[in-house]
Amino acid sequence: MNIILLGPPGAGKGTQAARLVHDRGMVQISTGDMLREAVRAGTEIGRMADEIMKAGKLFPDDLMSQILGARLDQPDTGRGVIFDGYPRTHAQAEALDRLLAERGRHLDFVVELDVDEEALVDRITGRFTCAKCGQGYHDRYKLPKLPGLCDVCGSEEFKRRADDNEEAVRTRMSEYRAKTAPILPFYEAKGLVRRVDGMAPIDEVGAAVDAILDGR
């Protein structure tokens, strides 16, 4: 099972990807993570990537294909792959098709977590966490049981992400639409796109994703 999981920041894409990794033994492939790891490891491609990124240039598609191909050849990908952050262009989508076909594989689904922008703004701008243990809360939907005290560790310190504000959230939504606009028509023409209500409770989203992957 090879899928692309799409969703703007805050839609729960990371949560669903982690669940698929845990429950199904799938591998999450993030091109950004792979490039950073190659840079840290000091490989030849890593050195090239470092120079390209420091110069503020886009990483060439042919080199990205080499990195992805090498990753797909590793045995842990045999139970399925979740592509994260790739492809972002029509050319990359075609390149991914070739990479998979060369290995006797194909893309099964493109699963998009569909969100309502206004509801997403409300979800993200209201969230905060315990500064000590990381337990998550929300101004409207999940306040601590005792005001000012974390339910888990009892800490009185809480924090919010600096970019969890309305302007930043709307900017991230705009960027997401710009990045997915080139590839969604490509996959829709192939009949691979499936949409799930990303605003539903986490377990319901997970069940809907499972139903798609299981052909139910």
Image (spheres, rainbow, N blue to C red):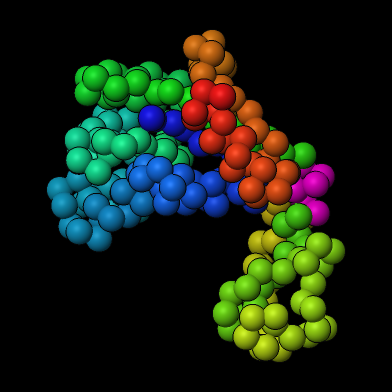
Image side of residue 104 versus residue 107, left or right: left
Split into 4 quadrants, where in the image is the C terminus? top right
Q: Is residue 134 above or below residue 58?
A: below
Q: Is residue 52 above or below residue 109?
A: below
**Residue at the top extreme, as displayed:** 189
**Residue at the left extreme, as displayed:** 44
Q: Is residue 55 above or below residue 196?
A: below
Residue 98 horizontal/vertical position (percent): 29, 19
The residue at the point 65 percent across, 33 percent down is 196
The residue at the point 36 percent across, 51 percent down is 33
Quarter assignment of residue 125: bottom right
Residue 54 horizontal/vertical position (percent): 35, 53
- The image shows a total of numbered marks equal to 0
Residue 56 or residue 69, whichever sits in front: 69
Residue 167 or residue 158, whichever sits in front: 158
The residue at the point 62 percent across, 35 percent down is 208
Residue 115 within the segment the image draws in magenta: no
Residue 73 horizontal/vertical position (percent): 19, 35
Residue 79 or residue 174, whichever sits in front: 79
Q: Is residue 184 visible?
A: no
Q: Is residue 4 visible?
A: yes
The residue at the point 44 percent across, 31 percent down is 3
Prevailing secondary structure class for the magenta stretch in the rendered image:
helix
Residue 161 horizontal/vertical position (percent): 65, 67
Magenta extent = 117-122
Split into 4 quadrants, where in the image is the N terminus? top left
Image side of residue 24 versus residue 75, left or right: right
